[in-house]
Amino acid sequence: MADITPREPTHRRASARCRVVMLPETTAKVASNAITKGDVLATARIAGIQAAKRTSELIPMCHPLLVGSVSINFSIGDDYVEVETQVETVDRTGVEMEAMTACTVAALTVYDMCKSADRTMSIEDVRLWEKSGGRSGAWRRSDAAI
């Protein structure tokens, strides 16, 4: 585990994105809240927030952080649900893993809630989108789209 004790706490932020690709019929059901298990996006949002707060319990060597804020947003396309997460803290190490964990767990929750309607789904393009703060400063993915 990296020694972060000599570092000064700074404001840090990271965002991540991924897509859950599915049949258009499934996307329509998610959009109209017609999935039998319940409100897919609300449940996925809660799951992602919980995952961000517990990342250090899931990823070995990941420092526990006091997560200041987590936001999870969804965009619905014709055949996908895009998940975008943003995590912020004031601490001695970054929140990239928290953002990616939140994104992935939110996507897994979408999958779990929709699997009875669509077994063809896939979770794709999990990526760190940007980060700021810390020694390495700001970084932003240059990809135009995922």
Image: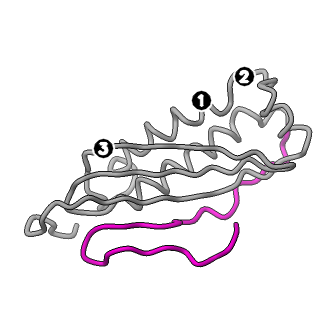
Magenta stretch containing residue 136, yes or no?
A: yes
Residue at numbered disc 3: 68
Callout 2: 10 Å neighbours few (<14), some, many (20+)?
Answer: few
**Mark number for residue 37?**
2
Tag 3's secondary structure? loop
- The mark nearer the N terminus, 1 or 2, is 2
Image depth: mark 3 or mark 1 in front: 3
Residue shown at 48% from the left, 58% from the top: 15
Image quarter hosting the N terminus: bottom left
Q: Residues within 10 Å of mark 1 (few under 14, many from 20)?
A: some
- Return the x and y of residue 87 as percentages of the image width and height: 41, 51
Give the spatial CA distance, label 3 vs label 2: 30 Å
Where residue 12 sits, quadrant-wise, is: bottom left
Measured as percent of width and height from the top left, residue 56 is found at: 33, 51
Labels 3 and 1: the sequence-earlier one? 1
- The residue mark sitting in front, 3 or 2, is 3
Instruction: Name the kind of residue labelled 3 in the image.
Output: Gly
Please tell me whether mark 1 or mark 2 is closer to you in this view.
Answer: 1
Disc 1 marks a residue whose amino acid type is Thr
Specify the amino acid type for callout 2. Lys
Disc 1 marks which residue?
Answer: 43
Quarter occupied by residue 4: bottom left
Q: Secondary structure at mark 2?
A: loop
Residue 86 in the image: x percent, y percent? 46, 52
Task: Give yes or no for residue 134 being in the magenta stretch.
Answer: yes
